[in-house]
Image (cartoon, rainbow, N blue to C red):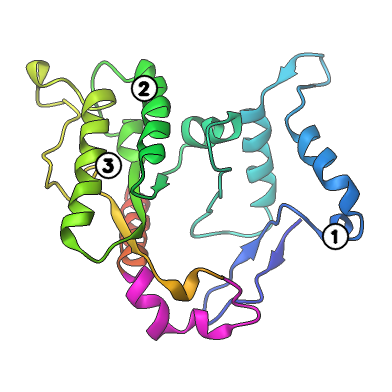
Amino acid sequence: MISVSPLTRGRGSVHVSAAVGSIGERNPQNILGKIARGYLEVANAEGAPVTFLARTRNLIKRLSQRSRYDAIFVDARAGLNESTAAAVLGLGGDVLLFGVDAPQTFAGYRYFLSYLQRFRPAESSDNDWRARLRMVHAKASGDPKRQADFRTQAFELFADTLYDLEEVLEETSFNFDYEDLAAPHFAWPILNDANYFEFNPLAYSEQFSKELYERTFGPFVSAVLDRLELSKKR
């Protein structure tokens, strides 16, 4: 289920576990059934149900046993569904919440974060799961004001759901100023770039040229690398 990415360059190595493999490509009529079976409830040897989260954890554990990785990225399914909830709540990793500046983005995340609100800890600590969340402003405008508008909506969303109420703030409270760079609402921008509207780096290798991707993804990649270094120290 694992192969080396043909786009790997330099000293590092990128392994990929694709959703569709060679057998699926030869039998495309079976792909939808395969996806449907992934959500079916299964039982262990004792007959007890095995949750989707437990199966996801087991899959990642087994896929990562043969190699030691500096980081494992899980591309969770878009939208509101059980697989997204499993990735956010149960895998114990940092969670990047991507969205464009559109009403449906914040409506969807309001439903989602309002649901997570019921699991908000009574007192924040070093392992507070809320600190692992981070908004990402996808297809962002280069205009600082437009980026600030997105950040304002994200701030209001977190303030209404996962941040602690102002009237009960203490030293251990989970709350942030609007301009706090470390806050979950302070979105990392990925600039809107027509060069990536049709993404096919196997056919167009220039899409992975440093000069091209740095202007679009540079700040985001730097932020992710800083986050990985911080995770190593936890």
Tell which circle, 2 or 3, labels the residue nearer the N-terminal end. 2
Q: Element at badge 2?
A: helix
Q: Distance from label 2 to label 3 (Cα)? A: 15 Å
Q: Which mark is residue 184?
A: 3
Q: Where does the C terminus fall, quadrant-wise?
A: top left
Q: Earlier in the sequence, mark 2 or mark 1?
A: 1
The residue singled out by tag 1 in the image is: 25
Q: What range is drawn magenta here?
A: 199-218
Badge 3 marks a residue whose secondary structure is: loop
Please tell me which of labels 3 and 1 falls first in the chain: 1
Quadrant that contains the N terminus: bottom right
Label 3–label 1 contact, CB within 8 A: no
Main secondary structure of the magenta stretch: helix
The image shows residue 2 at horizontal and vertical percentages of: 72, 60
Q: Residue at x 37, y 53 (%)?
A: 232
Q: Is residue 210 magenta?
A: yes
Can you tell which quarter of the image residue 158 is in? top left
In terms of image quadrants, where is residue 144?
A: bottom left
